[in-house]
Image (cartoon, rainbow, N blue to C red):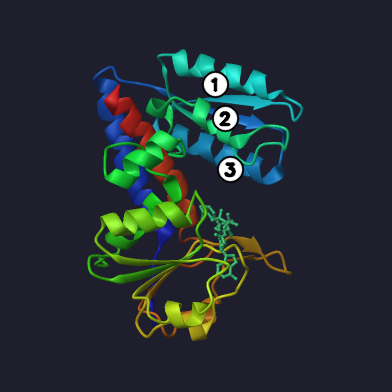
Amino acid sequence: MAEIIDGKKISQQIKDELKERAAVLRAQGKTGALAVIQVGADPASCVYVRNKKNACAYIGIESLAYELPEDTKEEELLKLIEELNQKEQVKGILVQLPLPKHICEDKVIQAISPKKDVDGFHPQSVGAMTIGEPGFLPCTPAGIIELIKRSGIEIAGKHCVIIGRSNIVGKPMALLMLRENATVTITHSKTKNLPELCKQADILIVAMGKPRFIGAEYVKEKAVIIDVGIHRDENNKLCGDVIFEEAEPIASAITPVPGGVGPMTIAMLMSNCVQSIEEG
Ligand code: NAD
């Protein structure tokens, strides 16, 4: 029986620590707001934006909501970001992705001041992470590092296999695991011998976006399995990229879906916001 890594509990611990840090900062007169920009009304984005506002309220950080219509022009969005870059009280700027097709996401990400880039997606933040300089870390991979460490699992010297090479999960995950002294293998859709490689992983991180794809044949005895995927199955139930009931008996520890990686992403966003307020 594997240990079930409880992301809900760990994210709550982190949020409680952040609440205390925010209170200390407030007492020193240091406050700040997170500006959350949403373009259009994609239902999933609405849920994420609401959760972010609620997390700010819980921790005691002001949140400013900018709900723009679907047909907002790219230059209007860029102008708003520039205004927020200049506003002293705004310490974090988050543009909810995906954006409507007529807006270039890269341009928008690059318009955010790296000092307020609490999503950690700006090329300057990515560069800083790559060479180990201070900066904002992307929330999902940083949350996974916290999940592993706070579960008492050693990373240094372990072989970590990552499935997926996206800019928001797979690639930064590889860099952060490398920073923790893991030996890292990155796999992707063109990888030829996926089961064989995965079976060598002490820590297997799955971010492929394929519902219930990873079964027993991918899992090494006593491996740690981190499932980043989130999907709705045919019964509208949440599931991950991993076939939990196949992987769990073989693994030593595993994240469930829901209640594993998911809650960590917002906790780490809040951590970046508190860091930004601290840094003034
Ligand atoms: P993505 O679609 O951008 O990337 C998927 C990656 O998986 C690609 O790099 C691709 O090469 C690889 N891949 C696809 N099929 C493969 C195959 N058959 N074999 C090997 N590799 C394969 O997705 P993403 O944005 O990185 O997200 C991945 C999953 O994680 C999605 O389900 C997403 O919803 C979820 N996600 C969850 C959170 C969270 O907070 N829990 C955050 C971000 C993403």
Q: Name the quarter showing ligand 1.
A: bottom right
First in residue order: circle 3 vs circle 2 = 3
* Quarter of the image where one finds residue 179: bottom left
Q: Position of residue 243 (x, y in %)?
A: 56, 77
Q: For the residue marked with disc 2, what is the amino acid?
A: Val
Please tell me whether mark 3 sits on a helix, a strand or a loop.
helix
- The relative height of residue 264 versus residue 194 in the rendered view (above or below) is above
Camera-side mark, 1 or 3 = 1
Q: Nearer the viewer, residue 37 or 108?
A: 108
Q: Is residue 241 left or right of residue 270?
A: right
Q: Is residue 153 left or right of residue 92?
A: left
Q: Nearer the viewer, residue 75 or 229?
A: 75
Q: How many marks?
A: 3
Q: Is residue 264 visible?
A: yes
Tell me, yes or no, whether the two marked residues, 1 and 2, touch with CB atoms within 8 Å.
yes
- Specify whether tag 1 is near ligand 1 (CB below 8 Å): no
* Quarter of the image where one finds residue 232: bottom right
Q: Is residue 37 left or right of residue 69?
A: left
Please tell me whether mark 2 sits on a helix, a strand or a loop.
helix
Q: Which residue is mark 2?
A: 108
Please tell me whether mark 1 sits on a helix, a strand or a loop.
helix
- The relative height of residue 227 versus residue 76 in the rendered view (above or below) is below
The disc at residue 40 is none
Q: Quadrant of the C terminus?
A: top left
- The relative height of residue 216 versus residue 45 in the rendered view (above or below) is below
**Residue shown at 45% from the left, 13% from the top:** 86
Q: Which residue is mark 1?
A: 81
Q: Which residue is mark 3?
A: 48
Q: For the residue marked with disc 1, what is the amino acid?
A: Ile
Q: Position of residue 235 (x, y in %)?
A: 73, 69
Q: For the residue marked with disc 3, what is the amino acid?
A: Tyr
Camera-side mark, 3 or 2 = 2
